[in-house]
Image (cartoon, rainbow, N blue to C red):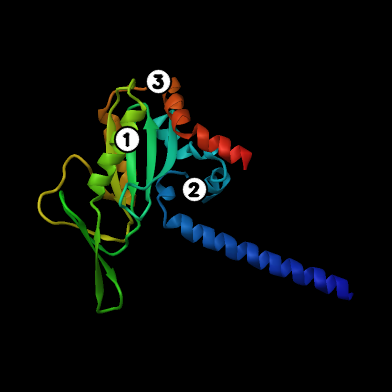
Amino acid sequence: MSVWNEIIIGIAVVAGGFFVLKNIYMWNTYRRSIQTEIYSNFVEYQMRKRDLVKLSESYYFKSRFGKHRIVYQIAQPKKNQTPQAYIILILASGLYILNIKNQNGKIVAKKRGDFKYFSKVSQKEEKLVLLKNPLDEIKFFEKKLRNKFPGIDCPITNIVIFPEHCQLLWDGEIDDKIPILKRKQLFGVIKQYVEKSPVVLTEGQIDSIFHTLVDDAIEMEKAG
């Protein structure tokens, strides 16, 4: 075997190893994310994720809810240093705002006031962090969203979502208007809302709302 053949084989092995490691990393990231509840599988998500228009649809949602759009947004309210991740689901039954959280420890939720978040520092020690109330955050986001669409009167359902492996507890009265869920509960809860709700948005309105929210971002994506 020539030296060049050995070099080519060596490069191929390194490139193959990098490809495998990269995909393992992306798979682990995917399986810990909310995307597992929206897209049919990892391959579909990988095919869609680099294009905002493709990302706005899901085989999984289409087979169950028909025409829909998915919008990803980041919001950072005043005096809040941490950007908040939101997903807006646009279905025929209305809009569903998902406030996505990533805390994996013990969460103590309250109807009013800060949430308590206990993260593990060690096997025996926990660190207490106060979280701005996600119920207040999502109500503020809803208000801003409604201001964008003064001519469309449709239901808006707010949902707060924490990771599957957190411990979710309530301090006092539970808020019965805004569900606080773990990730795996999302689809079942949306299905319940859809089954109880009439069709209020046409396919044209669903697309119109989507484009109002993301057209600027799509143009920036194309220019980039």
Secondary element type, mark 2: loop
Q: Identify the secondary structure beneath mark 3.
A: loop
The percent coordinates of residue 224 (x first, y second) are 62, 43
In three-dimensional space, the C-alpha distance between marks 3 and 1, rounded to whole angstroms, equals: 23 Å
Find residue 41 and name its label. 2
**11 left or right of 119 in image:** right
Camera-nearest label, 3 or 2 = 3
Q: Position of residue 71 (x, y in %)?
A: 43, 38
| Left or right: 9 as drawn, with respect to 205 | right
Is the residue 134 above or below the residue 199 in the image?
Answer: below
**Residue matched to label 3:** 202
- Tell me if residue 1 can be seen: no
Q: Nearer the viewer, residue 104 or 210?
A: 210
Between discs 2 and 1, the one toward the N terminus: 2
Does the CB distance between marks 3 and 2 fall below 8 Å?
no
Please state which amino acid type lies under the numbered disc 2. Answer: Asn
- Residue 31 lies, in percent from the top left, at 44, 56
Q: Which of the two labelled residues, at mark 3 and mark 1, occupies the earlier sequence position?
A: 1
